[in-house]
Image: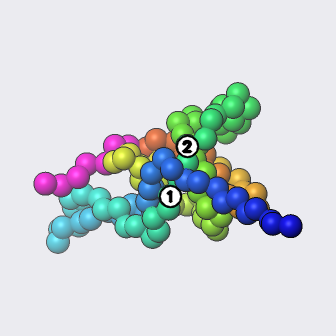
């Protein structure tokens, strides 16, 4: 008897998990921000159910994106960067194989040229 193991596919792209730090000049004036990457993860976009929107609204948030990543111990105090957009993580769920992140857009990231 053969046992068929199925692995989840994360085909929608790569997200960056990290934190935003403020950059100051010598006079302690804010001159910019940098995104410090702690980990890069493959992700899959998930469909957003009505109960997800209701939960977000009850928390005073908006649900802009829901993604699935491989099982990790992630915290809501960090940020997610996808396609030059920065997201807050306001809820994290998990099962035996995946971690589900509920994301709210914070800002569009400006890249320096």
Residue occupying image coordinates x 76% and y 62%: 4
Instruction: Specify whether residue 73 is in view.
Output: yes
Q: Pick out the residue farthest to the top.
A: 50
How many marks can you see? 2
Determine which quarter of the picture holds residue 107: top left
The residue to which callout 2 is attached is 45
Q: In percent of the image, x 46 and y 41: which residue is there?
A: 105
Q: Quadrant of residue 59?
A: top right
- What segment carries the magenta color? 107-113
* Residue shown at 45% from the left, 70% from the top: 38
Q: Nearer the viewer, residue 79 or 14?
A: 14
- Overall secondary structure of the magenta stretch? loop
- Residue pushed farthest right? 1
Q: Residues within 10 Å of mark 1 (few under 14, many from 20)?
A: some
Task: Compute the Cα span from label 1 to label 2.
Answer: 10 Å
Most foreground residue, 31 or 65: 65
Which color scheme is applied? rainbow
| Residue under numbered circle 1 | 42
Please give left or right for residue 46 compared with residue 39 in the image. right
Residue 101, position as x, y percentages in the image: 61, 50
Per the image, label 1 sits on a secondary structure element best described as strand
């Amino acid at each position: 008897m053969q046992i068929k193991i199925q692995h989840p596919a994360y085909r929608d792209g790569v997200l960056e998990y990290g934190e935003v730090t403020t950059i100051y000049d010598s006079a302690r004036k804010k001159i910019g921000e940098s995104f410090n990457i702690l980990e890069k993860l493959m992700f899959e976009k998930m469909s957003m159910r009505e109960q997800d929107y209701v939960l977000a609204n009850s928390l005073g948030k908006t649900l802009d994106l829901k993604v699935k990543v491989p099982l990790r111990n992630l915290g809501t105090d960090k940020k997610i960067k996808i396609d030059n957009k920065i997201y807050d993580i306001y809820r994290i769920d998990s099962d035996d194989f995946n971690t589900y992140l509920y994301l709210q857009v914070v800002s569009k990231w400006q890249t320096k040229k």
